[in-house]
Amino acid sequence: MLLKFTKMHGLGNDFVVVDAVSRKVYFNKAQIERLGDRNRGIGFDQLLVVEPPSNPDMDFRYRIYNCDGSEVEHCGNGARCFAKFVLDRELTHKRQINVETKRGQMQLNVLDNGHVQVDMGEPSFQPADLPFLADAMQALYQVQANGETVELTPVSVGNPHAVIRVEELNDELVHSIGPAVESHDAFPNNVNVGFMQVVTRGEVNLRVYERGVGETQACGTGACAAVVAGIKQGWLDADVLVHLPGGDLRIAWQGPSTPIIMTGAAEKVFEGQIYL
Ligand SMILES: N[C@@H](CCC[C@H](N)C(=O)O)C(=O)O
């Protein structure tokens, strides 16, 4: 079967996006891994599959797969690319789009400047929601990773994140502690690992070692998790500019029982077709 796809990115976090509304398409794990191979396939961090909704109040459903073939609940940069994709393909003319994901329902707004604002839902700091195996609720938790004691804040923003505050960001830290925490026994479903350097109360630098992928140029849910962790710990104010290696995101959170609002860019790179 010849598969049509669109290559997109959100701040360098790259996606292959497939229209499964106009034509039914299913992928198995081996196909996703092959398509995601940067040497033998197309290459992507995540595959996004846009489908009709199961709920008539929704406009679409979209599924998210990491390049290792695992299906995940949520993807911030992917959500913005999804919104641009359905408008570009004329699957809708709405600029306010309601979508179902594995995590639940979301609302996205395509702004006049082309950026997309996403209601990312409410975060949870309950260890069981990640899940994270902890004896008791604490503000900061310690785990042993690569022979070091690492302090982290576990956060679920629909998918699981461990946020580690650091004084300085460097490759050694991200590529040694990142994979060790990602697959730590305390996280039975594995975890995305964010390394956050606080610049001011309204600005942070962030690198994310993503579950099922490795370090990406940007992670939208990682940015949301880092900011809400920083607000909960008293390090950050309610509106924060997040500098990621691939670009900037604005994240706002007014506190418990309110949703996280993420605003940023999404770009189409090219269209293509490949034998599945
Ligand atoms: N890049 C994404 C997150 C994708 C899912 C993640 N790797 C997971 O396994 O939960 C984003 O922009 O949020």
Image (spheres, grey):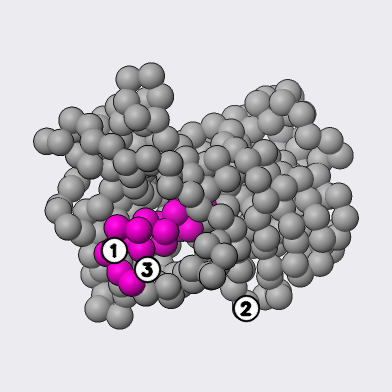
Q: Which residue is drawn at 23% across and 36% down?
A: 273
Labels 3, 1: front one: 1
Q: Where is residue 86 in the image (x, y as percent from the top left)?
A: 34, 61
Q: Mark 1 points at which residue?
A: 90
Secondary structure type for disc 1: loop
Q: Of residues 1 and 235, which is closer to you in this image?
A: 1
Q: Where is residue 222 in the image (x, y as percent from the top left)?
A: 61, 50
Confirm whether residue 102 shows in the render: no
Quarter of the picture holding the C terminus: top left
Which quadrant would residue 11 be assigned to in this image?
Answer: top right
Confirm whether residue 34 shows in the render: yes
Chain part drawn in magenta:
77-93
Q: Is residue 91 magenta?
A: yes
Q: Residue at x 23, y 42 (%)?
A: 4
Q: Name the residue under label 3.
A: 99
Give left or right: position of 92 versus 216. Answer: left
Prevailing secondary structure of the magenta residues: helix
- Tag 1: amino acid: Glu
Q: Position of residue 191 (x, y in %)?
A: 55, 43
- Against 169, residue 23 (above or below) is below
What label sits on residue 257 in the rendered view? 2
- Tag 3: amino acid: Val
- Tag 2: amino acid: Ser
